Amino acid sequence: MAFLRSFLFFVLISNCYFGGSIGDEEFSEELLLKPLPDRKLLAHFHFDSRTPSTKLHGHHHILVPKAIYQLVRKFRIREMELSFTQGRWNYERWGGFDPTSSSNAKPPGVELWAVFDVPPDQVDANWKNLTHTLSGLFCASINFLESSTAYSAPAWGFRPFSGSLRYGALPREAVCTENLTPWLKLLPCRDKAGLASILDRPSIYKGFYHSQRLRLLSNEFGLEEGVEPGILLEQTLTVVLQPRGQKTSTYSDGRLLQPSWSISSIFGRKVSGRCVLAKSSTVFLELESGLVSELSKLSVENGSFGIGDVAFEGSWSSPGFELSVIPDRVIKEVNGSHSESSSVMYEYSVDKLGDNGPFDVGFVWKLPVVWSCLHSPFHASRFLIGSGNQRGSIAISLISTGSDEGFMGGDLVGDGCKVRVDIFQVVPWYVKVYFHTLQVFVDGQPEVLKNIIEKMHVSPSEDRVSPGVMEMVLRFPCSMKSATIIIDFDKGFLHIDEYPPDANQGFDIPSAVISFPDFEPRMYFLEENSSSKSPMLLKLQEKNPVISYTEVLLVPLATPDFSMPYNVITITCTVFALYFGSLLNALRRRVGEEERFLKSEDQQGKLRSGWIENLHCPSSKATMVTGLHKAPCR
Amino acid sequence: MAKMRWFWVWVLASLFFRLVLIYFPKNLNLGSRPEVATPLTSLRRLAEGYWLKQSSISPYSGSMYHGSPLLLSVLGPLTVTRFEGQPNHVACSLLFVIADFITAILIRATGEKLQLAYSQSLRSLNLAKLLETSETLSAGDIAGLIYLWNPLTIVTCVGFSTSPIENLMVVLSLYGACSRLAPLAAFGWVIASHLSLYPAILIVPIILLLGYGPDTPPRKLFQQRNSGSNEKDPVLPVNLFSWRPVVHFILWASFWSAYVLVLCSIYLKQYGGLSEMFKRTHGFILTVEDLSPNIGVLWYFFAEVFDFFRDFFLIVFHVNILFMLFPLAIRLNHRPCFLAFVYIALSSMLKSYPSVGDSALYLALLGWFVYELADMQFSFFLFCGYVGVILLSPVMHNLWIWRGTGNANFYYATAMAYACLQIILVVESVSAMLHHDRMLRKQSTT
């Protein structure tokens, strides 16, 4: 027995060894913590596993889950993103411009998009199978995206150059721990070790925003040249939590001290150690540029650090705050030209801390600081106009946040300055949009569409077949304060079976995607030593357009009476029978014959009575035979 | 002469009234009333179809437009023409006013022809004494004025619906048939059936009209008269079925339909072509895809009926119209115009997307037979019923859709009541007409 056990151990060890010797299959785990201006805390977990091409290294994987590999292989996925979100990202308070928010803020519910590597006629079939597989994999009703009324094929509005892309969203999907568990199972260490072990379910779901994301990038089939073939699986979990402040002390000027926090206070657990399979296990603490500039102002005021900004740089404590653990490294963003200060990241490597007991980092505020985050150039929101259940209008309003002047770069000159805004909106078929009623108001004034709309692609909705898709490229003058895009719609009437069980709650229209391709925020970090490239930092340095999702709309529809299909069927059929019967009766009635019949009846009756009469007065015989008049008996 | 002037004054007054109403379209907002604009006739949907066509998408892509491509090419440009300071769609509304005017004139002309032919045949039967009463007002004038002053027609005309054009085509075909102009009758019939499918059943009365001529008392009377008369009396002309105009009509109808189809296929060349057009227009009518409420009975039925019975009931309801065609044609073959009225009334009751525009047409045609149907039963009850339904239906719709205090059954109940009223109207008018014939027979034999 002992021999067998040691043999197994040997096999395992050798496996690990050889697995390691391939060396290309990598897993890394990272956690980004970021204080938000409204006394909340953003925690962003980033798990990244990548595997080299199976052509070179065979089908056996150690780190990338088999389920994912099979998914990619079977449906020939080139790119896929699935997100489960509860709550709404607050673009005004939590920012919409920095890469963290613009790539991690997702619409409520489930959003799934995928690009397939198959001929165009097979894309839909692959999509349907994929939705079913994912629905099984994540215990969610993603299979509702199978129906052709639920997904769409955006041409260019959602992502540029999207060929065989399919996009679907389920705004009403409830996200809970049953979706998180399968997601965690895809990690090599699950939530038993490493950073994932601090994911305490109650504390995560207590938060204001919760979004778990799975992004898959595959170049298995070697179509793109120059890109390393393989599969990249990126799992992120973004939560916005409220740290429990021990005491809220108000300062003389009425400002509140931000609540201090530590990993153990927000998650209730400490990081016990790294996941042994991870190449790197890192915790970052980001102070965004607005906060950094406020902090350096503070330090200048207090004078404790003589030369302000320079002194603050690289320190882990300032008059404003204090860190409980000394960071291993301080990474400073190389300043873009736009703002006076740049964000700072403190890096902690969990692997180095393995021996010193569980890792915990605390952040103590010493002075109240008020700062604001970076806003996207326009704050986008969407709402419904009109009342009643017959028709209405969808309005998308863009309000300038006033922060765009700094980002405009060179083309701020004169009136020629234009901001490009892309809008991608999917409406279900029962919201019947009249595209000819599209109106654009700039600063409250109606504008000629040709001046604003550069490009537009619509595919109108077809009843019970496909949703309506609207993709637009708009160009607004930079000086614009607000813009509103209004489009009218009629509400459809559904069959009794098409209503959900709670029909009177209304129907959700998925979020519109508003992107600003002119703005591609990215962070630049000094490459101190390129060997320790963190996948998350690389991700933050990628160029991606600013994207914001609008609110989900709730459209109430008129409902029939669900309780009386039988009554309706019987009453309608009765009316039809009434019509048919009475008309046919009117047509076939022979009144002449009836009269004759009645007459003869009458005659017979008369005959009988006449016979009786005749006994008394036989002289009236002649009149009796004609039977027309009652014979007077004389 | 005074009578003539009097007629034209009323016509002009009605047209003026329409023009006044056109200037308040926003206040009335009739275009969104389900009673006025159905998915087939809504001008808003037509504008959407035209917009799609202009952006080089098929007008039938999506489920918005279900009308004819010809209508799109005629009315489409008018939906985007805007006059300075005028409300939108004013050009279309003016066109509808003109269409209404022409319809009324044609109804009047047809009515006069009918009356002339009828009085001739009555005289030949020595029943001229029956005509004495009908000299006061011509039936054509009455019918024309009913059409122009019927509130339903006015609402349809100013309510951004294409029904006035459809009605014009139906009346045009009847007029052509009455005056034995086979090309005109064929044109009207082809366009009307192309626009809304149901007028296709009018082929029976049109052929009878072309074959026998306008309405007469039953032909048996003439035969009896001829056989029973002395040598001295001139032999009455018994109307025999003349095949010539009928053959002309069929030839012209096939010519016009080929022409229409060619035009449509040219218009839709880059898109789905004719198959898509038929699927989206006539297919849409037959399969009752749109379940939005209207004054008919089918929408709620198909919103509630179980899915596996849907096809069965679709067949049953459509066959119900066809089933009645032949009994009616056999019984009323001597009165083709009245037959046409009954067919129009039936189809406007049983069609999948009825609107008040259809009722406006058959109520006007009822005016042709105002003397024959003088002793119709329940006429006061019917009048009150129509008024009641027309007043109640918007109220119920408002309660259900806008206020959310009522429910669908309320509105459906008015639709049921409306259907019952129409049934009573048809049945009573048919029996009154048969009764009138019997009366004529009695009069002529005694």
Image (cartoon, coloured by chain):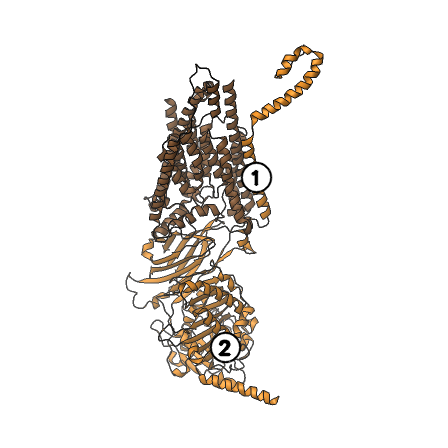
Chain colours: A orange, B brown
The spot of residue B155 in percent (x, y) is 43, 38
Viewer-proximal residue among A474 and A222: A222
Q: Mark 2 Cα within 10 Å, few/some/many (few <14, many 20+)?
A: some
Residue B162 in sight in this render: no
Badge 1 marks a residue whose secondary structure is helix
Q: Mark 1 Cα within 10 Å, few/some/many (few <14, many 20+)?
A: few
| Mark 1–mark 2 distance (CA, rounded to whole Å) | 82 Å
Q: Name which residue type carries label 2.
A: Val
Q: Name which residue type carries label 1.
A: Ala
Viewer-proximal residue among A509 and B250: B250
Q: Name the residue under label 2.
A: A364
The spot of residue A232 in percent (x, y) is 44, 75
Q: Which of marks 1 and 2 is in front?
A: 1
Q: In this view, does B365 lie above or below B292?
A: above
Viewer-proximal residue among A100 and A507: A507
Q: In this view, does B33 lie above or below A201?
A: above
The spot of residue B10 in percent (x, y) is 39, 29
Q: Name the residue under label 1.
A: A577
Look at the image and tell me in which quarter the N terminus of chain A lies: bottom right
Residue A55's image quarter? bottom left
Residue A492 in sight in this render: yes
Q: Which residue is drawn at 71% across and 13% down?
A: A615
* Mark with earlier residue (1, 2): 2
